[in-house]
Image (cartoon, grey):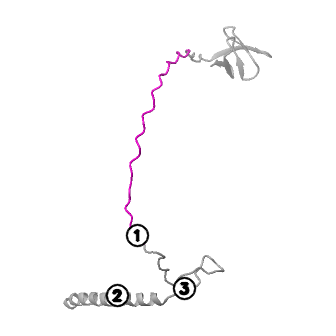
């Protein structure tokens, strides 16, 4: 166990030295490589691999970033609105009424009120839409 503890730092140092040497070799090899160019027949591939990136055309210069404030927006003018007239009260639908008798022009309920129309959609005497469901009719 003691020898393993002594050899671990020695191995770490050796790896660092070898890694530094490999980095220097990599730099020398990348200088010998051609500049990367696209294959003229297939633009999705490189003409020669491996290759090195092209050097910059001009050196980049630093530019300070300026972020300006947004201009102040004036508040929109307040337009006075006239109050809306009160809406008419919407009557609530009545409870379904039992149907007394029907003919080709419509039906009558048990109280004798007439519902004009054929099928399930009829109109009452006030012009409201009524729906017939079996033996009952309800107006909305």
Task: Using residue 2 as the reference point, say whether residue 106 is left or right of it.
Answer: right
Q: Position of residue 99 (x, y in %)?
A: 69, 15
Q: What's the magenta region?
A: 60-88
Task: Using residue 52 as the reference point, say whether residue 24 is left or right of it.
Answer: left
User: In the orientation shown, which residue stands out farthest toward the right?
Assistant: 104
User: In the orientation shown, which residue stands out farthest toward the top?
Assistant: 112
Give the class, few, some or many, for how many residues have Cα within 10 Å of label 2's Cα (few <14, many ≥20).
Answer: few
Give the class, few, some or many, for how many residues have Cα within 10 Å of label 3's Cα (few <14, many ≥20).
Answer: few
Residue 71 in magenta stretch? yes
Q: Which residue does the image show at 67% across and 19% down from the upper left?
A: 130
C-alpha distance separating marks 2 and 1: 33 Å
Q: Secondary structure at mark 3?
A: loop
Q: Which residue does the image show at 48% across and 25% down from the upper left?
A: 79
C-alpha distance separating marks 2 and 3: 24 Å
Name the residue carrying label 2.
19
Q: Is residue 64 above or below residue 108?
A: below
Pointers 2 and 1 in contact (C-beta within 8 Å)? no
The circle drawn on residue 49 is: 3
Judging depth in this view, the residue of 84 and 65 nearest the camera is 65
What is the magenta segment's predominant secondary structure?
loop
- Sequence-first disc among 1 and 3: 3
C-alpha distance separating marks 1 and 3: 31 Å
Q: Quadrant of residue 63?
A: bottom left
Q: Is residue 124 above or below residue 134?
A: above
Q: Nearer the viewer, mark 2 or mark 1?
A: 1
Judging depth in this view, the residue of 32 and 63 nearest the camera is 63
Name the residue carrying label 1.
61
Q: Secondary structure at mark 1?
A: loop
Pointers 1 and 3 in contact (C-beta within 8 Å)? no
The circle drawn on residue 18 is: none
């Amino acid at each position: 166990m003691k020898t393993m503890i002594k050899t671990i730092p020695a191995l770490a140092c050796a790896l660092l030295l070898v890694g530094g040497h490999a980095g220097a070799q990599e730099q020398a090899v990348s200088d010998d490589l051609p500049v990367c160019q696209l294959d003229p027949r297939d633009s999705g591939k490189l003409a020669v691999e491996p290759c090195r990136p092209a050097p910059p055309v001009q050196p980049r210069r630093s530019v300070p970033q300026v972020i300006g404030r947004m201009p102040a927006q004036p508040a929109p003018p307040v337009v006075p609105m006239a109050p809306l007239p009160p809406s008419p009260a919407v009557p609530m639908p009545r409870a379904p009424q039992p149907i007394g008798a029907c003919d080709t022009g419509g039906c009558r309920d048990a109280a004798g009120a007439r519902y004009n129309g054929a099928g399930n959609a009829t109109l009452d005497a006030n012009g409201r839409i009524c729906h017939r469901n079996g033996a009952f009719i309800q107006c909305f």
